[in-house]
Image (cartoon, rainbow, N blue to C red):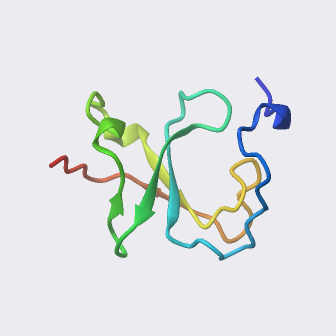
Amino acid sequence: MAYDSSMTRIVGGAGALPGAWPWIVSIQHPWVPDLGHWCGGSLISTQWVLTAAHCFDKFDNISLLYVVLGATQLTQPGHGAQMRSVKQVVIH
């Protein structure tokens, strides 16, 4: 299924400028349709992302997950975007 901008749920928003929100990440899974976005999160240090526990409570294989940082659009992440694998999940 291709990306359909008419299906977006943001009303009256504005596009993000590159680098405006460097701590926002997209946690992605290759089996999620369309963009692969599974959950959002916040970069809280150079190696840790904080997200909701329900993003991982039924997830056994974290090796399939990856984190996208520095993208202002998930459809076109751009040259400043970075992808990192998920190495560890701590639910508390």
Would residue 85 be found to the left or right of residue 54 on screen?
right
- Quick check: 14 above or below 3? below
Residue at 28% x, 27% y: name it.
58
Would residue 82 be found to the left or right of residue 62 on screen?
right
The location of residue 60, given as percent across then percent down, is 26, 30
Looking at the picture, tell me which residue is in the foreground, 37 or 12: 12
The location of residue 16, given as percent across then percent down, is 73, 66
Q: Quadrant of residue 46?
A: bottom left
Q: Quadrant of residue 55?
A: top left
- Quick check: 22 above or below 39? below
The location of residue 36, given as percent across then percent down, is 58, 37
Residue at 70% x, 62% y: name it.
72
The residue lying furthest to the top in this view is 1
Instruction: Please state the total of marks drawn on the protein image.
Output: 0
Would residue 79 be found to the left or right of residue 6 on screen?
left
Q: Where is the N terminus found, in terms of image quarters?
A: top right
The residue lying furthest to the front in this view is 12
Residue at 53% x, 27% y: name it.
31
Would residue 31 be found to the left or right of residue 20 on screen?
left
Looking at the picture, tell me which residue is in the foreground, 29 or 49: 49
The residue lying furthest to the left in this view is 92
Looking at the picture, tell me which residue is in the foreground, 82 or 39: 39
The location of residue 54, given as percent across then percent down, is 31, 36
Residue at 31% x, 33% y: name it.
61
- Quick check: 73 above or below 18? above
